[in-house]
Amino acid sequence: MPYIPHTETEIEEMLKSAGADSIEELLTCLPAALRVEGRLKLPEGLTEQALKETLAGLAAKNRGSSEQSVFLGAGAYAHYIPSAVDHIISRSEFFTAYTPYQPELSQGTLQAVFEYQSFVARLTGMDVANASLYDGASAVAEAVLMAGRITKRPGVLVSRALHPEYREVTETYLNATPEDIHEIPYCPDSGTTFVDAIETALGESIGSVVIQNPNFFGSIEELARIATVVHANGSLLIVVVNEPVSLGILKSPGEAGADIVVGENQSFGNALNYGGPYLGFMACREKFLRQMPGRLVGETVDTEGRRAFCLTFATREQHIRRERATSNICTNHGLTALAASVHMALLGPSGLVELAELNLSKAAYLRDKLNEIEGVSVAFNSPVFNEFVLFTDAEPDAVLKALGKRGIVGGLSLSRFYPELHGHLLVTATEVNSKADMDAFAVALSSIVEAEAATAGE
Amino acid sequence: MPYIPHTETEIEEMLKSAGADSIEELLTCLPAALRVEGRLKLPEGLTEQALKETLAGLAAKNRGSSEQSVFLGAGAYAHYIPSAVDHIISRSEFFTAYTPYQPELSQGTLQAVFEYQSFVARLTGMDVANASLYDGASAVAEAVLMAGRITKRPGVLVSRALHPEYREVTETYLNATPEDIHEIPYCPDSGTTFVDAIETALGESIGSVVIQNPNFFGSIEELARIATVVHANGSLLIVVVNEPVSLGILKSPGEAGADIVVGENQSFGNALNYGGPYLGFMACREKFLRQMPGRLVGETVDTEGRRAFCLTFATREQHIRRERATSNICTNHGLTALAASVHMALLGPSGLVELAELNLSKAAYLRDKLNEIEGVSVAFNSPVFNEFVLFTDAEPDAVLKALGKRGIVGGLSLSRFYPELHGHLLVTATEVNSKADMDAFAVALSSIVEAEAATAGE
Amino acid sequence: MKKVGTTGLQMNEPVIFERSVKGRKGVSPIEHDVPKANVSELIPARFLRSETVETNGAALPEVSELEVVRHYTRLSQWNFGVDSGFYPLGSCTMKYNPKVNEDIARLDGFTSIHPYLDTDSTQGALQLMYELEEYLAEITGMDGVTLQPSAGAHGELCGLMMIAKCLKARGETRTKVLIPDTAHGTNPASSQLAGFKVVKIASGTDGCITLESIEEAMDSDVAALMLTNPNTLGLFEHDIVEIAKIVHSRGGFVFCDGANMNALMGLVRLGDLGVDVVQLNLHKTFSTPHGGGGPGSGPVGVKAELAPYLPVPRIKKDKEEYTFEYDCPDTIGRLKAFYGNFAIMVRAYSYIRRCGPEGLRRVSEIAILNANYIKERLKATFELPHDDKPCMHEAVFSDATLKEFGVSTMDVAKRLIDYGIHPPTVYFPLVVGGAIMIEPTETESKAELDGFIEAMEAIAAEAKNAPELLHNAPTTTRVSRVDETRAAREPRLVWQP
Amino acid sequence: MKKVGTTGLQMNEPVIFERSVKGRKGVSPIEHDVPKANVSELIPARFLRSETVETNGAALPEVSELEVVRHYTRLSQWNFGVDSGFYPLGSCTMKYNPKVNEDIARLDGFTSIHPYLDTDSTQGALQLMYELEEYLAEITGMDGVTLQPSAGAHGELCGLMMIAKCLKARGETRTKVLIPDTAHGTNPASSQLAGFKVVKIASGTDGCITLESIEEAMDSDVAALMLTNPNTLGLFEHDIVEIAKIVHSRGGFVFCDGANMNALMGLVRLGDLGVDVVQLNLHKTFSTPHGGGGPGSGPVGVKAELAPYLPVPRIKKDKEEYTFEYDCPDTIGRLKAFYGNFAIMVRAYSYIRRCGPEGLRRVSEIAILNANYIKERLKATFELPHDDKPCMHEAVFSDATLKEFGVSTMDVAKRLIDYGIHPPTVYFPLVVGGAIMIEPTETESKAELDGFIEAMEAIAAEAKNAPELLHNAPTTTRVSRVDETRAAREPRLVWQP
Ligand SMILES: Cc1ncc(COP(=O)(O)O)c(C=O)c1O
Ligand SMILES: Cc1ncc(COP(=O)(O)O)c(C=O)c1O
């Protein structure tokens, strides 16, 4: 049997010590009548070689970024991951370890998390950050709950330009009191959240306001203005960042006035992986620390006064506080956070700035290029980072399909999430999209839209 | 600049300490007139991402075993390598270390080599084995030189059924005294070395006889008989094994009477890699130890009597003995030997036997299958392990080309090395060749040979 | 006895910011192949970082590639994983993480697929997910499975939300969840998050839930009983079938925390015992690595009545084509963006395929054998509070016999480190004083268990004869005991220059 | 000073055979999809192993996958690599081994190609080899390059054989090779193997070869002068151009051991200086990992006259197609099966492409700067026998100042381990008493060098004040000083039960 070292002789010896004649004898506490009859209905076990061949077969049925030219983003970004990242996270002392409950033999994980917290705090411009949450979406939900605990106000205003799946997750989490979520529309010209609508919707019961930046349409929000409005109401501003590479050039949410910053750190060090595992992050002002969910690592000393690290503020957590914990989270996303740390450390400040500028340049080039096409236009007039919305006269599904035939995944059709944005595509460009691929995209799109127009004109 | 950590400020500080105003000042010992003018004519440096893309492009220009159904062996075998192998040899404490000159911080490498030596000695049925040599071919040359030192006789008989490239390498090494190599023919029926011819060729001046088993044609040699003949002449029998998986079922060369066993251990743990790096091995009787080339690790103790390992018998080696060393080898093939060790340890004795039986079964199946084809026949009547020689009436290059069009690499055309074997193909099957692929090979070969026959008949 | 733990050369290593040198360049991104954008032309100044690269809030450390590699290599050397040694951390199922699964999860066809690709482009991934759902349903005896939750606790939340929604659909409002006192902390925390009030159920003297306590507590305001089976004492809840009947007959659901499935595969199916919802921890039972704290994956299986409430999207198979189904009117909604921790699913799927039905059953059998072996051999030395029958995959001892020497469970745990063994889970479950919760898992050999048993016996002897060895432990690690109180009193959660 | 070395938890681990348990199964090969052959029907009994699986000569240890992984993981933890810390092993160029090169070398298109595939199927590999030859020719100023040799020594042999063959073609028999006393041991050993007699040339007082000595030794029986430049004292052979002229004018060749190319890239080309043959160590200069003792790769570059003698096959480019050329009538033949250590070439090629011409030049400049920085800062503390001018990429100190304290170079080396630093090369070159040969390489930062310098200074102070610290070192490693004499006296080269 794979992965089981026991020989028959050893099993006999062990049974003898355990005072049983057979393994069955150890199973008498199981209800005899309800035991599994025969075998589970599962495929036969495979040798390692057959397993690898089988799974390689499944993998080959997928067509990823190495087989198509993909311009998708929308919360999951294809960035180049330096080789050192996987080499480091593959060190088994990291990846086969448990959550660092025993600090003396977990100093590696603990110091790495401490550094990660520091990176996130600096990146977001906040005082403290936690060790990780599941993903950007659940991090938003946790932030809203946290804001509710802090402000003792149950209501929340959520921008409609927040990632639709993040909105859904927040709704699911808050389901107990659904009436407390209010959606704030975006402005049809700019694609940014309608600040006046926030002002109108704010009130006594509103604990927090959730704004993504750059938002789901790629548009950069007026965070500072929003912060002023929100704070005037005594509410907290939760800023969501799911493309943290943007923080290489954009003002940090902390500087812009955010109280809690959450989001998705997948862009650093983690592959697309069909949507997961990614890693949620959360940072906040120091004063909110005790309401924060998730693990926290702190610096301390050992009995000899040497620097050491350990999990701390565990009294917020489920294993101590149980039903009064700040969250139910236990296992978090340690290894993906480590990958993010390594990537950030490799980039350094100048690498991060360069990477951000490169993403900006790529998207600007593509946007201009596509905007030139007859029958295609950029939908919103706000500044963007590395993604933007495109409007085509042609039927977007037909356009995407035709592009797909040429090996181009041209973007995300927004009508899926925004019925009002029929004909709109969310298009993303990062450093993995070459100029040649972008040019080919433009050529293909132009001829497809033209052909569609011709057909429509018939 | 990649991989260089210095900032400009640091360089200035360091120059100051070094008493120089510029790096140029440190280079004054270089002949000014002959300095490189401008830049070397090399392609511009690349970022890591661009490098990876470029090299992936080169890799994609090759069509390896995952894109074709390959039945090649001939000294380089495609075996399944368990995943654990690469995970272990990728541990940087192993792969970024130097040769273990400082035993106190190289115990990992040293113990692993000690274990490897033990594995090889057991596998070959010999008393001792060294830490590795470059490859099977150079190992043969080293063995012949070693036998010369031991017997003080300069001559060597080499079977024509030894891998032709091993013969070439041996010739190159022995070039100083070329007249000393004599080739022993193989028997046209069995494809095995002609024992009577050995007997005839032996004489006072012959230090050693070199026999590969299974030999280049896959045929199993009459080692024990040969050993008797060779020893009767006071010569040494050098047995060459380049498919060590065969040792799972075949009598060990030691038991058969070999004095020195050398060969290629690539089959264990090392990918095809277009021919290298592989790893030569050498094992011998204890009494020949001091004439052995290459590194040796021995068990000893530390100052507290704890078990420890270190390089030993260095007085045989170039860094001590210089021109009187047993060989010039310095850097050997440590990491590929480690890979071989891990693979062997994972297999264990029963895994090795199973693997050998599986290879035997695959080749037997394929041989029978191909032998059924009209116009195709198995060339030699001796028992084989996992490769065999096939004769086709049709022009072998045309056959191979036609197979290639169907994604099948049908074997090695032997006329390349053996003009007398025109029309012969060396065909290999291991556990990576599935029944389906072998059946497809038979179908394709049958139709190709038929078509060729038709054309030829026209 | 052979002590595995010793000391050897390790390196001190500062916090990475302390390696930073102003002006050093990290790894540069690829060259621009498009015109370099003029940032301030594209983005108004009010949106841009006002700080310079050196001083801005994103001020990451400035280190070279080798320094990064060396930094983390050294850090890793202070850590202990399953590959380092025996790791009998109870409740956590620290089994071998097969290397082949890591290689498979890194296949380009899995790593490079964007979650919003057309399903045409992801048939392999969808097939894998679909089949994994089927396998997990078969293993647990459930009718429907979602792979979406990111971890066990997330799965608990998911299951409880489905119960809430189903009750609502039934037109009922039930506000309470019954949770035994042996439960993991996530159970009450998840219940609370799902909007329920927690009612604690005291375990019986044999460590299991009694029929009586459920009879008594189970009223019409109870939405569910949330138990763990085997429970955290490593005991099979022997009355589970009757308990489930009571709960069901009074309109409640039975939720089983499936974190301990390593004891049951191929032996009994929770669904057959009356469980309505179960969450699984792929990072425990199904051998995906724990990663020093995740990512895990916490699929949830449910009986048919609850299936309509599973999170969206569901995976649908139509002839040989796989697609997503979003149109599930009764769903609780979503628990995370996209579809779950796919790369973890790949590993778990690989594990199930590698083991097959016989292998999985053997996993549980040997996990149970290993635990009983330790239990029987150690009970002469350590107090075993619950010993009426064989345990399942883990055994819980107390520190009762140590107290007279002034030695605590924590001391034993720390001393084990010196022996080269990771401490068991300690002080949990709460119902056992100074609990020492030992889960060996099936991948550990008899020799490894014998080494552990001898170490525990040696430590028990030390506790009597030289307790200071325990108080001062660990002495082999780079740092000695860590001052956790100070960490909380004087919080330093981010690096300060 | 900050001492990097400390101790931490490591594990004892037996020889793997001592973990073996009779009857345990390792990893099974894939299932038979063809009928299982009847072994004894196919192969006569006299060819088969007579022993049973348990007792036969191939008796490998019987261990589980986790045990194998744990075994080697623990072994690795007793080792020290470049990723662990500073590794100033002189002559060995222990620089950072880029991780990206490892990933590239593992691309399926490189690993899965059989050497006897048709060249149609290997155009990418051939292009890489062809271009690598071109790059190395450009870097060294040579006309032809072979990639076949497996290591530096193999390359030396190759070069010397070409010289021999060329001389033969010229109709000459020359039997001697001149080798300076600073040369690496492989130089005389390779010369001997190539059929030459070695004549030792004493270096001048400044550590370099003198014109006079060559004038004197260079007679018509000398086939070649084999020098190393920079030599093993880290000094550039300043008279090389004149020396080469003398050698050439008297019918000899100049062979340069190119192991120290890390000092010269983009600065001078050996070919331009009069060198006729050079071997390169890709595992030094070109950053391929040393692997705990190889595999390396030792390409050889030659001037036009020697090019016909290069080993076969050569790589040929015809329009855009690459093929092998076997038809080289004057070739020395082959030095290994197939074409060389291809996977190592992939790494070196990647390194050259990553660095580009400016990067390579910078490598050498900074390697030289680092060495001079150490040299200047340490020469107040340790005797520096040759200090007339700047050194190149390494510096050699002696133990002269230590002797009065009864302390040797070996003691310093072992004590450095306690500081967390790999010892430099010691007792080589032989011309310096108790040589301490320090090569920092360009990938080490100033901070790392400063740490080393401080450690050396601290050790020098200890040598005076507390020499027993040095005599007893290392104390941080799992084993203390190893008894090498006993290893040779009582040989135990394989494990015995
Ligand atoms: C019994 C039990 N339930 C639930 C959990 C929570 O699982 P997770 O950490 O994956 O959220 C754990 C894990 O520690 C556990 O042991
Ligand atoms: C100067 C010098 N020459 C030659 C060699 C031999 O190279 P290799 O070990 O690759 O055979 C070395 C390596 O130690 C060396 O330092």
Image (cartoon, coloured by chain):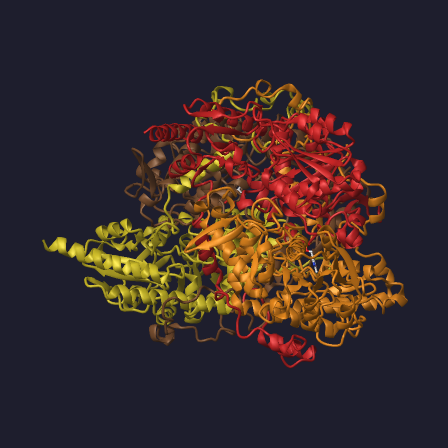
Chain colours: A red, B yellow, C orange, D brown
Give left or right: position of A212 versus B230: right
Q: Quadrant of ligand 1?
A: bottom right
Residue D95 falls in which quadrant of the image? top right
Q: How many marks?
A: 0
Residue C411 screen position, x and y as percent: 82, 60
Residue B125 screen position, x and y as percent: 47, 68
The answer to which of C67 and D312 lies nearer the viewer is: C67
The answer to which of D407 and C12 lies nearer the viewer is: C12
Can residue B159 be seen at all in this image of the molecule? no
Can residue C210 be seen at all in this image of the molecule? yes
Where's the N terminus of chain A, which quadrant? Answer: bottom right
Residue B388 screen position, x and y as percent: 31, 62
> What is the residue that sits farthest to the bottom in this orientation?
A21
Residue D326 screen position, x and y as percent: 30, 43
Q: With respect to residue D37, does B260 lie above or below?
A: above
The answer to which of D114 and B278 lies nearer the viewer is: D114
Residue A257 falls in which quadrant of the image? top right
> What is the residue that sits farthest to the left in this orientation?
B458
Query: What residue is shown at x 42% (from left), y 66% (from top)?
Result: B356
Give left or right: position of C282 versus C186: left
The answer to which of C340 and C288 lies nearer the viewer is: C340
> What is the residue that sits farthest to the front in this orientation?
C171
Where's the C terminus of chain A, which quadrant? Answer: top left
Q: With respect to residue D48, does A337 lie above or below?
A: above
